[in-house]
Amino acid sequence: MPKHRVLTEFGLGTSLRRQDYTEAATRAVMDALWRNSINMAELFGFDKASMIIDVEIAVQAPEEVDCAAVAGVFPYGQVSVSAHHGGLDIVRPEGTGKPTVIANAAISVSFEMERANG
């Protein structure tokens, strides 16, 4: 059965002082999720576990993101997380300390289903 995307959400997260790319990524995911209550699974008559959730994270150091930790934010679904170069590192004004990290997240929810119109 083909996979069909039914929803895309976006979020932004930061690590202000610790330069923690995983924390910024996790906060970006929570930003996208916590302002919504979307009942896609129920709408289509699926169990929530059948949701296919693809998460793309953009940060300046994608190799520093613990993708398994980011996936742990989701309470259900088949979650896949990938990290890519993007986001921003903002140098602190005084020039000391670690930069502020800004992460972007794009969350796509899909289901395996046939089209109603064939």
Image (cartoon, rainbow, N blue to C red):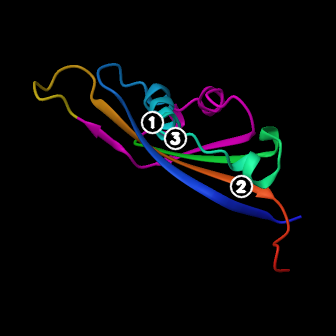
Seen at 35% across and 19% down, the residue is: 18
Q: Which residue is mark 1?
A: 31
Image location (x, y in percent) of residue 29: 51, 37
Mark 3 and mark 1 lie on one chain; the one further toward the N terminus is: 1
Other residues around mark 2 within 10 Å, as few (<14) / some (14–19) / many (≥20): many
Label disc, if present, on residue 36 of the rendered structure: 3
Numbered badge on residue 108 = none
Using the image, determine if residue 44 lies above or below residue 116: above
- Disc 3 secondary structure class: loop
Tell me: residue 105, above or below residue 68: below
Of the image marks 2 and 1, the number of the one nearer the N terminus: 1
Eyeballing the image, is 2 above or below 52?
below
**Which amino acid type is shown beneath numbered disc 2?**
Ser
Q: What segment is highlighted magenta in the picture?
A: 61-90
Q: Is 54 positioned to the left or the right of 61 in the image?
A: right
| Disc with the residue nearer the chain's start (2 vs 3) | 3
> Which residue occupies 74% across, 63% down?
4
**Residue situated furthest bottom in the rendering:** 118
Q: Is residue 15 left or right of residue 116?
A: left
The amino acid sitting under disc 1 is: Asp
Q: Which mark is residue 110?
A: 2
